[in-house]
Image (cartoon, helix red, strand yellow):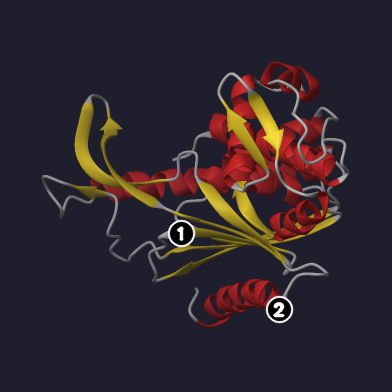
Amino acid sequence: MSDDGRDEVGGAVEIVLTELRRRIVAQEYPEGSMLPSQRDLAALFGVSRDTVQRALRELSEDHWIKSRQGSGSRVVIKASQAAFAADDAARIRKAEMGWFVERAFTKAEVRLDVYCLTSESLDAHLRVQAERTLVGSATVPEKIRLRMLLPARDMPLPVPRNIAAPDDNSVVERLLGISDRCLSSLEDTLRNLRANGPVQEFDFQVRRVPVAPMFKLFLLNETESFQTMYKLARRRIPLGGTDEVDAIDILSVGATGTYFDKGDGVDDAQAAWVTNQQEWFDSLWDHLAT
């Protein structure tokens, strides 16, 4: 399941973080100076105070600022250190899935490889991006190639699991139904973008592997990756009508993942990580998927 609202907030946090880092590096907010108040920053960036607070909390955790309740936030990092840290943050950093999808679809050509459980979150984010495109508030690529690896339909999945009746397959059937609807919606969204937007061509392929994903992996143009781990939680699952069961389920609500960029200037270890992830995906696609 997904939480689009929280992912939208996460994207706004990234925008505020990026701009605050830029201003500190440029010494618009030099070492020792006080940042504007949370209220002023919220007005400046057109976001909520909660978004500003989350951005300031991350800057504080990364030792860019020191915040004290009632006294504001003071810059404690030197400009030279900030420049180095900002470059590193742009290459490996925490990110929300919504931010990554929005970033992906600013490219002229998108080659997106996805390994996940259902494609529910991707479907939700892609539909949001398509709506923005169709009203002219966002760009969209001219070419899209989307390859998805999903678990084989006939393999036993460890979750979701009915706690009272572990052999009950109804919760898994419900999950597969969600996945089928999302795949259909993804294809419909891509066709709609080609019919009404600048997308000239798209290639959408789905293959299945006898592996149960415990994380999501998104690979963009063989140079960027986003990965987030699924979490297990106990919750009530509706089965239709008034039927509900207690179950162990996989959740990705508000999931924050790790973003890696293989671009120029990164160290060998970072670049190798993205390369290894791409090679891992390709090996499953070529040798295990059907």
Q: Position of residue 141 (x, y in %)?
A: 83, 50
**Residue occupying the far front of the picture:** 32
Q: Is residue 55 above or below residue 218?
A: above
| Label 2: how many Cα within 10 Å (few below 14, some 14–19, many 20+) | few
Q: Position of residue 54 (x, y in %)?
A: 59, 33
Q: Amino acid at mark 2?
A: Asp
Residue denoted by label 1 = 215
The reply to whether callout 2 and callout 1 are in contact (CB within 8 Å) is: no
Q: Is residue 64 above or below residue 128?
A: below
State the residue in front, 110 or 218.
218
Q: Is residue 114 left or right of residue 201?
A: left
Element assignment for label 1 = strand
Residue sitting at 87 percent across and 41 percent down?
27
Q: What label sits on residue 136 in the rendered view?
A: none
Residue denoted by label 2 = 268
Q: Position of residue 66 (x, y in %)?
A: 62, 37
Which of the 4 image quarters holds residue 205? bottom right
Q: Amino acid at mark 1?
A: Phe
Q: Is residue 246 left or right of residue 222?
A: left
Residue sitting at 73 percent across and 34 percent down?
16
Residue 128 appearing in the image:
no
Residue sitting at 82 percent across and 35 percent down?
29
Answer with mark 2 or mark 1, whichever residue precedes in sequence.
1
State the residue in front, 29 or 44.
29
Q: Position of residue 75 (x, y in %)?
A: 72, 38
**Residue occupying the far left of the picture:** 164
Element assignment for label 2 = helix
